[in-house]
Image (spheres, rainbow, N blue to C red):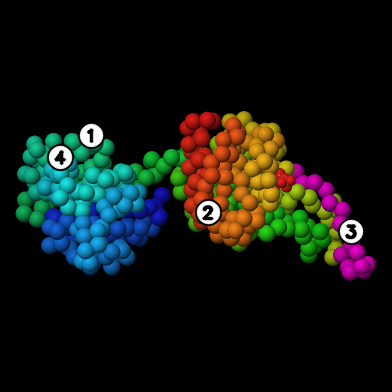
Amino acid sequence: MSLKNKHILLGITGGIAAYKCAHLVRLLIKEGAIVKVIMTKASEEFVTAKTLSVLSKNEVVTDFFDANNNWNNHVALAEWADAIIVAPLTANTLAKFASGHCDNIVSACYLSARSKVFVAPAMDLDMYQHPTTKQNIDTLRKNGNIVIAAESGELASGLVGEGRMAEPENIIHFISQYFEDNLPLSGKKVLVNAGPTYEAIDPVRFIGNRSSGKMGVAIADEFAKLGADVTLVLGPSHEVPNEKLVTIVKVESSEEMYKACELVFKNVDIAVLAAAVADYKPKSIADSKIKKKDSELFLELTKTTDILETLGKQKKHQLLVGFALETDNVLEYAKAKIAKKNLDFIVANSAIEKGAGFGVDTNKVTIIDKHNKMYNFELKSKQAVAKDIVTFAINYLKTDA
Ligand code: CTP
């Protein structure tokens, strides 16, 4: 598990170990994290904001106001963060955190934190052993922060003992492990299907549809990001998941998609069927290319298996989610599908509304649960819609499953 795409706010305070933060930022970036750095005035004596700005690829915030007198919004910074790391944490800032003092950007962000805060204390041997320091560290722990204990070794003063800031590699390891252990969907198995299906007419022709697979692939990615073991049954689509841990089963026809989904469905906790499965397929597939002859050609079509409806009948413990893509009466038709296909909730979207549906990078959805309660979402990127759907599923599991 990496820190890929995690928003990390690194607070640096004024100890000699601050110089190691350049390396820490590089490691965070290497892990795929998006890093913003905030610094106290004292820390700028040990490492420059410029260095950290170049390494983090972001502007470094050192005060409540920038050089142009614009306010640096500490609340927004804290809200942005998936985790805050304060390293090194000096005895002085530790005492401020423990008592709620707020006189610089780092302590303001600490008090505004919504995410976990990790602190890596660094101080001299006797300071680290002082009963007040120990009390303050205890207070931070009691307040829900995670303390990455100082390591033993040679200290800047020449003394040898506990007090060195944990090495950047160890800080990274600690935080990655924390995210891995605390992912909301660790241990959960998820099935997602996505993309169109191609129903063969003859060896060179098929009946297909305009689905790109973007929405379903984004959903698979989002589940995987939160620790789920995801199988993505993907029709003919150029989309590929970003998350390496998604298992992809490539299929072409609705029949192949049905078989692949049914096989996986028994063992999953959640299934989201986002694919645009053909409703009809040619009754027979010509063995060789159909030659051009008459002015008209009639194809006889037969119904495909409704994958979602079939899984709905087999459903036991699984949370089952469907999609409804409609051109008119979106909500009415979507509600009917919840009952018909035995769903927990359905994601309804319009095929004709601007910015929604097939082929575009955005979507605008309404989620309707099995009690017919509706939740409207704004037009947003398919990644953001995927996040909304997965969050809805997690909350649904907690309250309604
Ligand atoms: N679905 C499916 N198998 C099919 C057809 C649809 O699993 N053969 C699933 C889709 O993946 C989607 C849901 O059923 O999650 C609704 O699909 P949609 O095309 O909106 O509706 P249909 O049930 O096909 O009905 P209609 O085309 O008449 O609206």
Can residue 401 be seen from the camera position used here? yes
The residue identified by callout 3 is 298
Residue 142, disc: 1
Identify which amino acid the numbered label 1 is placed on: Lys
Cβ atoms under marks 1 and 2 closer than 8 Å: no
Where residue 298 sits: x, y (%)?
A: 89, 58
Q: How crowded is mark 2: few (under 14 residues within 10 Å), some or many (20 or more)?
A: some
The tag earlier along the polypeptide, 3 or 1, is: 1
Give the vertical position of 365 relative to 393 (above or below).
below
Asked if the beta carbon under badge 1 is closer than 8 A to the nearest atom of ligand 1, the reply is no
Range of residues picked out in magenta: 290-305
- Distance, label 4 to label 3, CA atoms, is 80 Å
Q: Disc 2 or 4, which lies upstream in sequence?
A: 4
Residue type at the position of mark 3: Phe
To which residue does mark 2 refer? 379
Q: Can residue 88 be seen in this view?
A: no
Decide which of tag 1 and tag 2 comes sooner along the chain: 1
Kind of element beneath mark 4: helix
Magenta stretch, main secondary structure class: loop
Name the spot of residue 1 as percent of width and height, x first: 41, 49
Q: Is mark 1 on a helix, strand or loop?
A: helix
Sequence-first tag of 2 and 3: 3
Q: Tell me how many marks there are.
A: 4
What amino acid does circle 4 point to?
Ser
- Pick the residue in front: 319 or 327: 327
Separation of residues labelled 2 and 4 (CA atoms): 43 Å
Compute the Cα span from label 1 to label 4.
13 Å
Whether residue 75 sits left or right of residue 14 in the image: it is right
